[in-house]
């Protein structure tokens, strides 16, 4: 008998409604915080993790020049240090700036980033150095503390990446496209990320039925 302890099931990522409430809180806090630059940076970074789905290790290595607003319909982020498979070296990719992220990063670069030292990192600390992964996790944890929601409503930076995959899949994005968005080598990795809501099948059935009825009526 194997002595390996079974891995606990991964909990679902935060819902779209949960994240809408969280980001509304984070945005409102910008008007009252005593450290506006750091709070605004955190807001832009967390929105980036959710809307373009980079890993935290990838996002903290973005330079300002990696934001390309003119590429594609909404602009793209150049993930130059994408996670490698085994020892193959970095695997670059282009991540689209979806759901208004292009406007958020335009605001951040124009109005917030100038508060920090004139260095190359997109998301930097007070000394102009790239943020560290633990710093990102701690900053999110502190923000969730301030929000004061129940423990079940808490999430991690990585959960934002999982939420991005799940919510786009629920809205109709096929798995192969989600795979490209996440930068996965294997579709099995993407399938492990996607955790639709408990009513996903029923919601899809209602959409399909509504479309069929509309087609027949037309």
Image (cartoon, rainbow, N blue to C red):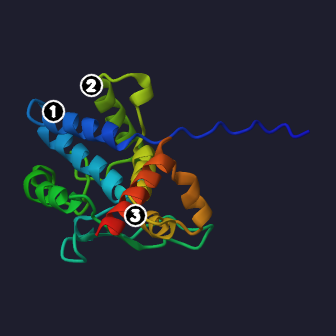
Where's residue 136, x and y in %?
35, 43
Check if mark 2's residue and mark 1's residue have beta carbons within 8 Å.
yes
Task: Tell me the distance, in whole angstroms, between the alpha carbons under discs 2 and 1.
Answer: 10 Å
Q: Quadrant of residue 118?
A: bottom left
Tag on residue 212?
Answer: 3
Q: Secondary structure at mark 3?
A: helix
Q: Residue at x 26, y 41 (%)?
A: 20
Is residue 71 something that shows in the picture?
yes
Q: Which residue is mark 2?
A: 146
- Residue 39, horizontal then vertical, whole percent: 19, 39
Residue 41 is marked as none
User: Element under label 2?
Assistant: helix
What is the spatial separation of the Cα atoms under label 3 and label 1, in whole angstroms? 45 Å
Residue that extends furthest to the right in the rendered view of this protein: 1
Q: Residue at x 58, y 59 (%)?
A: 189
Question: Compared to 206, does 216 lie above or below?
Answer: below
Residue at point 25%, 44% (across, down): 42
* Number of residues whose C-alpha sits closer than 10 Å to that of mark 1, classed few (under 14), some (14–19) or many (20 or more): some
Of residues 142 and 214, the one drawn nearer to the viewer in this rendering? 214
Report the residue marked by disc 1.
Answer: 29
Is tag 3's residue or tag 2's residue first in the polypeptide sequence?
2
- Res. 35 visible in picture: no
- In which quadrant is the N terminus drawn? top right
Q: Is residue 67 or residue 184 the one in the foreground? A: 184
């Amino acid at each position: 008998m194997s002595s390996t302890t079974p891995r606990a099931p991964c909990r679902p990522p935060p819902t779209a409604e949960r994240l809408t409430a969280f980001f509304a809180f984070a945005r409102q806090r910008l008007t009252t915080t005593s450290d506006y630059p750091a709070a605004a940076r955190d807001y832009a970074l967390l929105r980036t993790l959710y809307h373009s789905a980079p890993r935290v290790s990838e996002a903290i290595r973005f330079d300002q020049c990696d934001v390309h607003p003119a590429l594609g319909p909404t602009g793209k982020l150049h993930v130059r240090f994408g996670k490698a498979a085994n020892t193959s070296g970095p695997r670059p990719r282009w991540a689209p700036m979806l759901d208004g992220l292009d406007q958020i990063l335009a605001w951040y670069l124009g109005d917030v980033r100038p508060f920090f030292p004139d260095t190359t990192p997109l998301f930097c600390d007070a000394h102009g150095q790239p943020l560290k992964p633990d710093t990102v996790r701690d900053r999110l944890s502190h923000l969730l503390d301030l929000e004061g929601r129940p423990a079940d409503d808490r999430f991690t930076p990585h959960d934002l990446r999982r939420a991005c995959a799940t919510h786009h899949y629920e809205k109709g994005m096929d798995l192969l496209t989600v795979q490209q968005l996440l930068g996965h080598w294997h579709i099995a990795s993407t399938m492990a990320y996607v955790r639709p809501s408990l009513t996903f099948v029923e919601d899809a059935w209602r959409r399909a039925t509504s479309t069929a009825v509309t087609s027949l009526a037309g």
